Amino acid sequence: MFWRKRRIALALGGGGARGLAHIGVLKVLKREKIPINLIVGTSIGALVGGAYASGSSPEELQRKVEAYLHSPDFRDSAIKAFGVAHARGERGLAQKIQAHLKNYFYLIQAMFKPGILSNEDFQKTIDYFIPDIRIEETLIPFRAVATDLVSGQQITFSRGSIRQAVMASCAVPGAFAPLKEGEKLLSDGGITCLVPSSVARQEGADIVISVAVDRCMVNPPELRNVVDIYYRVSEIMGERLKGYELDQADVVILPEVGDLHWSDFSQALSLIDEGERAAAEKLNEIRRNLSGLRKWFRF
């Protein structure tokens, strides 16, 4: 009889701050001793997945997130200011005026720069979470997904600097300038692959556990201007792309992340807790999938 080692892949989707829920998912999988033989990440999924694949435990990642969000580097960063400007919830008149002015400032910047936030600050954030190693050296095989804006092609990183791969995968269009690599201009993997289930399949995974953390798509408020319409079109396209990718997963974990803006890190700990809850809810389904082909595979 033919035997081979079964490959179980974890596909972590993009969603900015909402992707902190991935840490909670990893906590549950580790605690329950669910074997993971491959991690594929898009955007924040590449950041969290790359850190875990490199040897950081979920608990260590949570501690680093808490420390980073309380650090002067983050408090004084443009990312923090951008998140505050887009934060939901009740705000006083002064806060609303301040947020409006910040949004206007960022909109003006966007007319003259390829990215409105500093790539230098962005690189420091990546370096804080990701070690200076090559992808080939990770403890768990790892892939990061980005998009080449020149060719329009999806790019999967399987070798080279993990920091550069993660930074390319996380380069949110408009917020951060794309990374130049030869003839390529590399940007967020979520443009072409919001949840990288298909990449996990292409890499030979037998079972794919996918985690989606994008914003919930709800009926929009009045579409009053070009910006409103552009965002709505992007939401619709993203939802269609996500559906295609999730159809290729064996288990789908959907933490309830609401409609937080990608840059709003104010709910970090709640998001991690929600990731734990959502993963725990899917444990029976995960175990059924792991045992379903046991007679054909050897762990």
Image (cartoon, grey):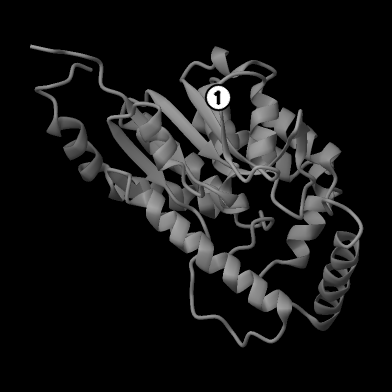
Residue 185, position as x, y percentages in the image: 74, 39
Q: Quadrant of the N terminus?
A: top left
Q: Residues within 10 Å of mark 1 (few under 14, many from 20)?
A: some
Q: How many marks?
A: 1
Q: Can see residue 89?
A: no
Drawn side of residue 163 relative to residue 279, left or right: right
Q: Nearer the viewer, residue 171 or 49?
A: 171
Q: Residue 46 location in percent, x, y?
A: 57, 36
Q: Residue at x 88, y 73 (%)?
A: 101
Specify whether 168 is left or right of 109: left
Q: Position of residue 100 (x, y in %)?
A: 83, 75
- Which residue is found at the position 60% from the left and 57% from the top? 267
Image position of 2 (left or right of 34): left
Residue at (64, 62) in percent of width and height: 261
The type of residue carrying mark 1 is Ser
The answer to which of 109 and 149 lies nearer the viewer is 149
Quarter in which the C terminus is drawn: top left
Q: Read off the residue under disc 1.
A: 56
The quadrant holding residue 240 is bottom left
